[in-house]
Image (cartoon, helix red, strand yellow):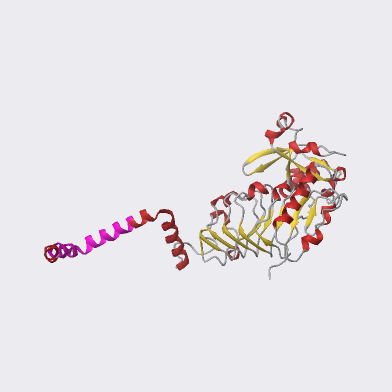
């Protein structure tokens, strides 16, 4: 039985003084953010409740906490900040960090979620997200039908729904959906693009089928945790998958094809499990750091941490390579094979052609 999912939102630890010492050089808000916020990127929208484990007495501590939170929480577009009623905002010194190999500057605003109205733009989108999701899936056990009741105007009511986790109990901003083990059926749920604050999605231990959407990265662009394990998803793994993923679990499905080379760009990926599928081909080199158990049960996979592709005698791998060649260019493969066979016969068995030439007149006379 698949173990229960790990919590999607972990507590924020305080950072040691040694780490704070290493980042003393900070300046005021960068001109790029002041003059052209859209070009600078996105900033964090975080409730003060999320940093309670850390001290509020030292701005350097909070600045360091912001760097850590950047790895965990959704980035909100600058253009969307106008929808929030900011009851209090604390401005901290600018930090520098890395995104891949590119340095970037963040300007952190700590938002008080108690000032968010249930009628604000974000909340309406989140409600639309859940309504669309509910309508798009089959719920044989009636769990969503009984729990997800939209006939209320109580502030933050969607935060009481089964499997819905919000930034705070009263703000109606969904940050995670944990629908594991609810017996849901159908294809990949629709409407997730309206949950603009979503960073955790767990659909494990259900009966979903069909492909994983090719544009999943556009639907849930800032997802950091994705668990689709123990379903019946089929088809290939999307090439363009969420780039900010820390956790990806697609174990025990019916996925086929190769692991996309784009997985090399998942720089934050700390936990991966693609076991028990029908995957084939070479494992991307950047994934060799994960244990062999993360790839087990895929007869066609090879390369570290599994056996080298050149040493494996697995017939399914050979079959995959041949089938892939035939699928991509059947005519070229056939012509090449015919040329090779003809060359070998002509070189090693020239008497066959001599015999055929001598036999030709007799065959001609008979005909």
Q: Position of residue 72 (x, y in %)?
A: 73, 50
Left or right of residue 346: residue 195: right
Residue 25 visible in the picture? no
Outermost bottom residue? 1
* Residue 336 inside the magenta-drawn segment: yes
Give x and y (percent) for residue 181.
72, 65
User: Is residue 356 located in the magenta-colored stretch of the structure?
Assistant: yes
Q: Is residue 242 left or right of residue 63?
A: left
Magenta part mainly helix, strand or loop? helix
Give left or right: position of 291 versus 220: left
Along the line of sight, the residue nearer the viewer: 11 or 358: 358
Nearer the observer, 70 or 96: 70
Image point (72%, 47%), residue name: 194
Q: Point out the image quarter for the C terminus.
A: bottom left
9 versus 311 height, above or below: above
Query: In the figure, is residue 120 to the left or right of 313?
Result: right
Residue at (76, 44) in percent of width and height: 66
Q: Is any atom of residue 142 visible in this view?
A: yes
Q: Residue furthest front?
A: 367
When the figure is inspected, residue 285 is found, relative to residue 32, above or below; the finding is below
Who is closer to the viewer here, 256 or 104?
256
**Which region is colored magenta?**
335-359
Locate residue 292, reporting x and y percent: 58, 64
Where does the N terminus fall, quadrant-wise?
A: bottom right
Coordinates of residue 294 in the picture (x, y in percent): 60, 63
Going 65% across and 58% down the picture, which residue do you hit? 187
């Amino acid at each position: 039985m698949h173990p229960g999912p790990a919590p999607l939102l972990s507590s924020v630890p305080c950072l040691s003084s040694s780490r704070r010492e290493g980042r003393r050089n900070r300046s005021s808000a960068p001109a790029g953010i002041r003059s052209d916020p859209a070009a600078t990127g996105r900033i964090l929208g975080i409730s003060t409740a999320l940093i309670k484990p850390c001290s509020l007495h030292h701005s350097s501590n909070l600045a360091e906490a912001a760097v850590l939170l950047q790895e965990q929480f959704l980035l909100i577009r600058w253009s969307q900040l106008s929808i929030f009623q900011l009851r209090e905002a604390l401005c901290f010194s600018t930090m520098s960090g890395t995104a891949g190999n590119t340095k970037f500057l963040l300007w952190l605003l700590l938002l008080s979620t108690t000032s968010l109205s249930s009628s604000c733009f974000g909340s309406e989108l989140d409600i639309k997200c859940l309504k669309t999701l509910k309508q798009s899936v089959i719920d044989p056990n009636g769990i969503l039908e009984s729990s997800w009741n939209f006939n209320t105007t109580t502030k933050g009511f969607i935060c009481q729904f089964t499997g819905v986790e919000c930034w705070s109990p009263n703000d109606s901003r969904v940050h995670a959906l944990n629908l594991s083990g609810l017996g849901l059926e159908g294809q990949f749920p629709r409407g997730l693009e309206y949950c603009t604050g979503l960073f955790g999605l767990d659909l494990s231990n259900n009966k979903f089928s069909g492909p994983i959407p090719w544009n999943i990265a556009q639907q849930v662009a800032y997802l950091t945790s994705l668990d689709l394990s123990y379903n019946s998803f089929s088809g290939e793994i999307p090439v363009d998958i969420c780039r900010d993923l820390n956790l990806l679990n697609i174990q025990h499905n019916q996925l086929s094809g190769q692991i996309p080379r784009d997985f090399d760009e998942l720089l934050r990926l700390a936990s991966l499990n693609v076991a028990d599928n029908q995957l084939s081909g070479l494992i991307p080199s950047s994934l060799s750091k994960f244990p062999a158990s993360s790839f087990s049960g895929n007869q066609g996979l090879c390369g570290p941490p599994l056996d080298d592709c050149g040493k494996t005698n697995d017939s399914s791998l050979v079959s995959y390579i041949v089938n892939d060649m035939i699928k991509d260019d059947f005519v070229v493969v056939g012509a090449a094979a015919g040329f090779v066979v003809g060359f070998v016969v002509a070189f090693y068995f020239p008497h066959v052609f001599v015999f055929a030439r001598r036999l030709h007149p007799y065959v001609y006379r008979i005909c």
